[in-house]
Image (cartoon, grey):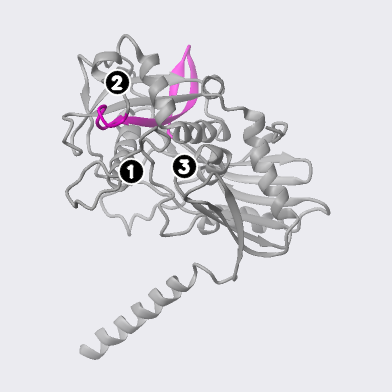
Amino acid sequence: NSLFSNKPTAEDLKWCGHLDAYNEAYDRITSKTPKPLQRIENKEFYYVSTTDDPIIEQIAVEAGEAEEGVTRVYATDAILAHLMASSRSVYPWDIVVQKMGGSIFFDKRDDSQFDYLTVSETAYEPPAVSEDADAINTPEKLSLEASVINQNFTQQILHGEKGRQQMDDPNPFYDEEESPGMEPASVAFRYRKFTFPGIELVVRCELHGTVTKRGEKQYMTAYALNEWDSKHSAGIEWRQKIDQQRGAVLATELKNNSCKLAKWTCQSMIAGADQMKIGYVSRKGRTDPHHHQILATQFYKPQDFSMQINLSVLTMWGVFKMFADKFIGMDDGKYVIMKDPNKAVVRIYSVPIDTFEEDEEDEEEEEEEGDDRGAAEN
């Protein structure tokens, strides 16, 4: 693979949100003493795209005109990690790219499945689509289940307000009036600038908590792998293996969820996380997608873990650089990067500048009409 690039230099631009401290009781969980996964009902999670982020907009405006020969690129860690790990993807996906002047913005579509986790995407026999409305192991249902598990896990393993670290600025997406009785999840948004020759890349990164190791406070990310039905996922029963043979469990997950694990690792490295916490969460019963147990958790250093899963940091940045260089050579406008649903091929399409934006205008018009109707009825 010739897609290599040296690691860029990184610089922090802004910190927002807060981080709660890790609860070390979760290091001691075993399959004999599992903890029920709780439903965290009062936390708000935000998956805001690049051009909808007010902080990125502020950074772009304040940066002004780029120097001659320098292109500014803006993205979120999730979008960037997705591109970096895209050679492992099987399911179709798309990313919207806007090029304006000396700047390039990588975005996701509002109504895409982008933020949902895939399940057993890279397995020899991935989950099958079913016409049965009650089927619980379809790709869509499993994706929703895994995404909810992941959210709940990241918050459950933290202490809450005890040991909370507030960042310089509050969470930019939280609005108390819009979310009564809710609070933002423990997430720090770390806006970072990565500098390559001719490219300045600004990324909104996420961290999920802090952990103290040998007396030193470290930043961590957290993610959950989930067991749904080992019979169907070419797997081994986690409850039998996870305590003595965790390596075997992880090896199977690496086969079945190679793309997802690579994305998490890329995100953790882009965010500058010192530790990456992986949780192993299983259904309480094979046919019950609503109740789960945490069977084990494990810390990994993202850099070490990347070597374990055969993810080269130089290739990671090389893939980004390849996409960036491609768009630097193209005219201003709007583009879509699309993964072919049936082949390991990615294509770039040029689209009209107002593509994907009509829906918003239609919605606004409908709302106005609704308001007029309401006024007329009164």
Over which residues does the magenta segment extend? 208-233
Tell me if residue 210 can be seen.
no
Secondary structure type for disc 2? loop
Residue 19 in magenta stretch = no
Q: Residue at x 52, y 24 (%)?
A: 302
Neighbourhood count class around disc 3 (C-alpha, 10 Å): few under 14, some 14–19, many 20 upward = many
Q: Are marks 3 and 1 in contact (CB under 8 Å)?
A: no
Q: Which circle marks residue 236 in the picture?
A: 2
Magenta stretch, overall SS:
strand
Instruction: Kindly give the residue lying farthest to the right in the view shown.
Output: 68
CA distance for labels 2 and 3: 23 Å
Residue position marked by numbered label 1 in the rendering: 143
Residue at (76% x, 55% y) in the render: 66
Q: Nearer the viewer, residue 102 or 162?
A: 102
Place residue 149 in its image quadrant: top left
Q: Is residue 158 left or right of residue 135?
A: right
The relative height of residue 125 versus residue 239 in the rendered view (above or below) is: below
Tell me, for residue 90, which label it has, or none. Answer: 3
Mark 2, Cα crowd under 10 Å, few <14 / some 14-19 / many 20+, is some
Q: Is residue 251 above or below residue 51?
A: above
Residue lying furthest top: 244
- Percent of width and height locating residue 356: 49, 67
- Location of residue 183 in the rendering, given as x and y in whole percent from the top left corner: 32, 46
Among numbered discs 1 and 2, the one appearing first in the sequence:
1
Q: Give, as a three-letter code, the residue at label 3.
A: Val
Q: Kindly tell me whether residue 192 is visible in this rendering.
A: yes
Quadrant of image for the N terminus: top right
Q: Are discs 2 and 3 less than 8 Å apart at CB?
A: no
Task: State which mark lies toward you, 3 or 1.
Answer: 3
